Image (cartoon, grey):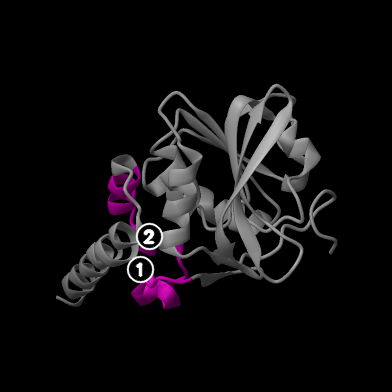
């Protein structure tokens, strides 16, 4: 009975997220709303945070990292414009929640994480959910994917002082990249599109993310 009550409470919280935190705030892409309704966010947070899984704010996941608030996850995904024929690079696996959202929309997701423990946990959760179109790496995400290639879509899930040049070099022609950009405690969520070797940037809104530590990110 307790488990059923818990499940009912989480289902209600998920519906509240969809209605009040997403649709009411201009998240209109039907595919984004569908996958946000399907993916159980409670699976990606520590057990002690399970009851707050659909709280519209970031939650700690260990190693000084956070799972982003649902609205920001939805907004970044909507702005990335992912389709079923896209291969997506994600810089910063974190909890794996954003990874799962992207994987349900894309052909394949390539995700890189600095902290091995976070990557291992994310891999385990995605495995339990049957999400198998994801390739994981451990390393410095600010330097991009370790193999030479390009991606139609790139998402950076931690703050960067600017778009890292090695990551920009992996964005395909007419590709789209989304990242929180800024050197201060707050950043601008920024969308960039690549045309003829030129990056065209548009600021979306203010945001606050943990910093991407790395050779082409922030110093340790």
Which residue was labeled with disc 2? 41
Residue closest to the eye, 83 or 195: 195
Residue 84: x and y in percent read: 40, 27
- Where are the magenta residues, as a range? 32-57
84 left or right, relative to 193 = left
Residue 188: x and y in percent read: 63, 59
Magenta run includes residue 55: yes
Residue 140 appearing in the image:
no
> Which residue is drawn at the image coordinates 79% and 53% (left, top)?
217
Q: Say if 70 sits above or below 85 in the image.
A: below
Query: Residue 19 appears in which quarter of the rendering?
Result: bottom left
Residue 80: x and y in percent read: 50, 40
> Which residue is drawn at the image coordinates 76% and 50% (left, top)?
162
Which residue was labeled with disc 1? 54
Q: Of callouts 1 and 2, which one flags the residue occurring earlier in the amino acid sequence?
A: 2
Determine contact: label 1, label 2, CB under 8 Å: yes
Q: Specify the principal SS of the magenta part.
A: helix
Query: Residue 164 appears in which quarter of the rendering?
Result: top right
Q: Say if 101 sits above or below 189 in the image.
A: above
Residue 127 appearing in the image:
yes
């Amino acid at each position: 009975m307790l488990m059923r009550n818990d499940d009912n409470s989480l289902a209600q919280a998920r519906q509240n997220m969809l209605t009040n935190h997403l649709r009411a705030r201009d998240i209109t892409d039907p595919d984004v709303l569908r996958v946000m309704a399907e993916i159980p966010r409670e699976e990606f947070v520590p057990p002690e945070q399970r009851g707050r899984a659909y709280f519209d704010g970031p939650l700690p996941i260990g190693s000084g990292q956070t799972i982003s608030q649902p609205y920001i996850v939805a907004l970044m995904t909507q702005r990335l414009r992912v389709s079923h024929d896209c291969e997506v690079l994600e810089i910063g696996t974190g909890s794996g929640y954003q990874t799962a959202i992207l994987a349900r929309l894309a052909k394949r997701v390539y995700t890189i994480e600095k902290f091995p423990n976070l990557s291992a946990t994310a891999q385990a959760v995605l495995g339990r959910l049957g999400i198998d179109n994801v390739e994981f790496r451990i390393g410095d995400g600010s330097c991009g994917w370790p193999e030479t290639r390009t991606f139609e879509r790139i998402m950076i899930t931690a703050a960067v002082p600017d778009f890292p040049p090695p990551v920009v070099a992996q964005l395909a022609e007419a590709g789209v990249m989304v990242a929180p950009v800024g050197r201060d405690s707050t950043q601008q969520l920024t969308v960039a599109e690549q045309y003829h070797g030129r990056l065209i940037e548009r600021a979306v809104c203010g945001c606050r993310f943990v910093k991407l530590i790395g050779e082409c990110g922030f110093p340790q």
